[in-house]
Amino acid sequence: MRYPPEFVDRVQEANNIADIIGQYTQLKQSGNGYMGRCPFPDHAEKTASFSVSEAKQVYHCFGCKKSGNVFSFLRDYNGMSFPDAVEYLAERASISLPEIHKDQNDQFQIQHDKKKALLKANKLAAEFFAETLKRAPNDHPIKNYIQMRKLKPETITEFQIGYAPSEWESLAQHLHQNNISAAVAEEAKLVRPRKEGNGHFDLFRDRLMFPILSPTSEVLAFGGRIHDQGEPKYLNSPETPVFNKGRVLYGIPHTAKYIRAEDAVVVVEGYMDLVSLFQVGIRNGVATMGTALTAEHAKLIKRLTPNVIVLFDSDEAGQRAAERSLPLLLAAGLYPRGLVLEEAKDPDEFVNKFGVEALQKKVASAPELFNVVLHMWMSDYKGEASQKVKLIDQVRPVFDAIPDSRLKSLYATELSQRMNVAIDWVRSSLQKPIQQRDYTRQPELGSNAANASEPHKTELPEPRKPLFLLSGSSQAEILLLQLALKSRANFEQILNQPGQQILSQINHLGVKSLLEKAEQVYRQDLEKFDRLTSLLIDHVDKPELLFGISSLGSTEFDEEKENKMIQDCCRRIQQMFLKEQVKKIALGFKQNVDEVKLKEIDGLQRNRLSLNKNDK
């Protein structure tokens, strides 16, 4: 799907890149821009090297060299296609999408439109639940429950918490009034058809509602908690084309920037656990919505941080959860730690009893999950031969899941000491079995073993070739380009060099073409200068070359210094241009000596000498 360039520009102008990136990493004011830790998962850093410019609407990491605009960030960080990014940003800015001719036989477009319809229905439902809670009288049981759970108004607003009324058709009627068809509402799992007669009834009734959001804050589904006696305590949306609970973690849009800032994530079981922790200041958490951790969950976490602390219940179910989680987290290359809160049934109760500082200390000192699980398995260990064999067989799948041989070796040493056996025996016993389970993939429900063993294939769009190749350009040419994009004053000075026509004298075709394109855009609309870098960044082979002198965190204009740098660059570019001209003319001498050409070379050489004198 293609959108008109003027519509894309409008969408980009309506969204602030600092607000978008600020959802994933904490940004702090630095000069005229912002600095923070790089949010990309393949660049783990302890000090801030990631810079965002509001003026230019671009980002640049001085560590990993990733650069781009808001569209490239959503593509590289969230895996969005360009049309998806445009639609997400348009929705975020309340801009209506233009009407585009659609092929009725395009299956991709059909699925795309279906998902959009489901997301629209979910958004309307979330707004309905939030408004219903807001309008409930103060003596309503749901308000009493909120008061008992000590939920603050700002917390309710942050997580868009709402209330599903007890009436059977309230939401169904609301969706119908807002032109959501019964078929869409049913597929979104918001309503169900009546067994007898016509019509639909609401799936969620008389529950505190927690919208489940995507990383880009789209409403995917809901979790509803009962506020009185009854079962089930939690009711989650069934799976839909936009919601798979094994691939979604509750809370990420609210907590991602804190997770990245702390370089650690606390994994809890349910909505209320996460919201309670967030409210008392532990904001680097996610929740699994009452389900077991999956390989997809581990991949989501890896994008934010490699350090995981999982909170488990102290009962048998908590022990089983710890055992299942360990190989999954290790297989994803994470460093998991585990914490069992034996003094309370959940984190909220622990905080109420002992205070948030006590929980923070426990989280900070949580042991490695490997040791937590090993302690469980060795609770009645007496060192008998049969116990040693059983334990090594029990622990072998965990070792098979570890991709890092160094970590595997250290765990083997620890295991040998705990078991009181020779390290060589442990290593030989931990050799991979013939049938090894792959913890990095889980078969979809309903798939057979043969299908589950096939690797998942995803067709990726062919990357666009850059329009401007900057590789091989000289230092002077790149410095001039960086100065040109740094400020409007610099750009005007470069374009208006007296009698030099400096753009025509640049040797490198990529730099020359890019500056000519920048001039064209600038001349058409002077107000577009601040967005020039953002407009051009997706069309070069090395975006990092657009930065440097134009350090995003330090954009102060030093007129005298930068004027001198521009003059120096122009002189060097002129020298290179004249040298190339001499070479071209000299090549013609091999066939024919021309007096006119000799005079031309002499003039060029004199110009070069005068430029050299100016350098000195």
Image (cartoon, grey):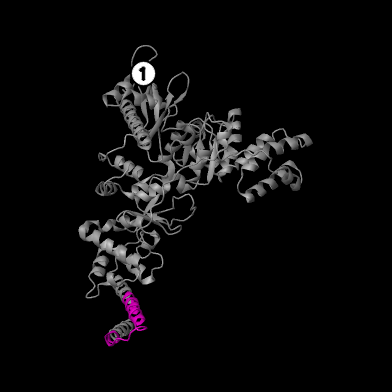
**Residue 286 percent coordinates (x, y):** 47, 38
Answer whether residue 590 is magenta in the image: yes
**Residue 94 percent coordinates (x, y):** 27, 39
Bin the neighbour count of mark 1 within 10 Å (Cα to Cα): few under 14, some 14-19, many 20 and up. Answer: some
Q: If the image is split into quadrants, where does the N terminus sit? A: top left
**Residue 587 percent coordinates (x, y):** 36, 80
Q: From this viewpoint, is residue 440 visible?
A: yes
Viewer-closest of 307 and 577: 577
The quarter of the picture where residue 130 lies is: top left
**Residue 112 percent coordinates (x, y):** 36, 36
Q: If the image is split into quadrants, where does the C terminus sit? A: bottom left
Which residue is the extreme one toward the top? 196
Per the rendered image, the range of residues in magenta is 572-599
Left or right placement of residue 213 versus residue 132 in this view = right
Number of labels in the image equals 1
Q: From this viewpoint, is residue 25 visible?
A: no
Q: Is residue 577 above or below residue 167?
A: below
Amino acid type, mark 1: Phe
Q: Which residue is mark 1?
A: 201
